[in-house]
Image: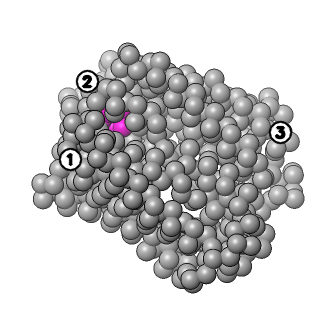
Amino acid sequence: MPALIGAVVFAVASRSLDPTAFGLVALAITISSLAAIIAPSGFGDAIVQRAEIGSDHLNTVFWLCAAAGALAVAVSAAVSVPVAHYMSEPLLLALIPAVSAKAIFDMAAVTPMAILTRRMSFHLVAVRTTIASVVAGAVCLGLLWAGWGLWALALSQVAGSAANSIGAFAAARWSPQLRFSPRAFHDLKRYGAFASGTRVLGLIYPDQLLIGFLLGPYALGIFTFSRRIFQIFNDLIAGALSSVAHSFFSSLQEHDEKVKSAFLVVSYLSSSIAFAVFGGIAALSPELIPTVFGSGWTESLSPVRAFCVIGLLSSIGFVQAALITSQGHTKWWFYYQLLKQCVLLLTAIVASRWGVAAIVWAMAASSIVIWPLTVFKSASIARVEVSRYAARFLAPAASCLAMIVTITMSMDVLALEHAWVRLLALTVIGGITYLAVLLLTSYKTVFDVTIMVRGNRR
């Protein structure tokens, strides 16, 4: 539901605002995210991972995060002046501090969210996320209707974070006490530090900063529009499953065979969905983008397809991340994310002279080059042969290829004038092709996974 709400709001906003407006808001969010680099949000993961947790641990993490959130807002306000001057965009003077306010709410929610995840109260997490999405969407659509322009995008970010934080406290039924324990901090600092670093690397986008400063707000708008399409569907696949997988793998730390079995099953499920979704978007994008988002975004066609490649790796990678971090290898995952960010940034710098599309395709190529590192690491932890693990992706990949070929051929022969009807017909044709080939190429695996999922539910 949250992903669907986000997609609808995004589609409406893209029809109301131009790439420059998207680019300015994206630049403000990127700068405020860089200011939040000090945020110890990974200490929430430390609460989930640690076997025994007391009230001192919870209160210590809350106040640590709250102080970091307030400092991030102050830093964002300070840097807004030179950034606005450099970009010759006075609007950034107010836009950057306004967007950075979400850091306070995000940091406040770390502890209650960790409590909910530790309890495996994922239904409450889902309800909270849905409410936050509804609030953010309502604020965005309402302000767009009132003529607030790009402020609708900016303030909806803050409203969503505020609703998310309030919902987390209400669901966890926990309130902080004015207490900070150095001993509790010491218990959590090692895992929390590396987990925080990993989260920061996943939340900051130096490539957006590079594009904004070198190519301008319009190019950044095209880039963030393309990335947003990827994020919507990536969240749809990985959003809820990521926290569930992390908690589930954490609970199986002493059961090697169960870890192996669960890892293979979840990997197959995630890849089957990812190849269908991102392969379908890549094939349908010439029809999808102008029909759903408007003709003003046709320049994003190539970047969207490149992000679909990244989306395939990301949707498989969240399972690897859950396994690696849940089994205590947060340090390795942090350094991998650091390497990945450095490679992507260097790639973006080299490719920037050829424009946005070249940057995204270079990022996709770099992601493919370093992806085997996580394949070997996760296979080693799960104690499964790399060949057996890689074989899980063969049937979804073959089904994806068949789907892309079918959709591409159908575009040339399908005589339907109404854009929405044509898009729906192509989607159905592609979906049927994918499912048919998947069943033909991996019927036994589909059957075994279905039996296993039903057994776990019982």
Decide: few, some or many residues near mark 2? Use Cα within 10 Å; few <14, some 14-19, many ≥20.
Answer: few
- Report the residue that reaches farthest toward the left: 147
Amino acid residing under circle 1? Leu
Q: Is residue 128 above or below residue 29?
A: below
For label 3, the residue is 380
x, y percent for residue 228: 39, 41
Amino acid residing under circle 2? Ala
- Measure how far apart labels 3 and 1 are at the Cα level: 50 Å
Looking at the image, tell me whether mark 1 or mark 2 is earlier in sequence order: 1
Observer-nearest of 380 and 57: 57
x, y percent for residue 160: 37, 63
Image mark for residue 91: 1
Range drawn in magenta: 220-226
Decide: few, some or many residues near mark 3? Use Cα within 10 Å; few <14, some 14-19, many ≥20.
Answer: few
Looking at the image, tell me whether mark 3 or mark 1 is earlier in sequence order: 1
Label 3, secondary structure: give it: helix
Amino acid residing under circle 3? Ser
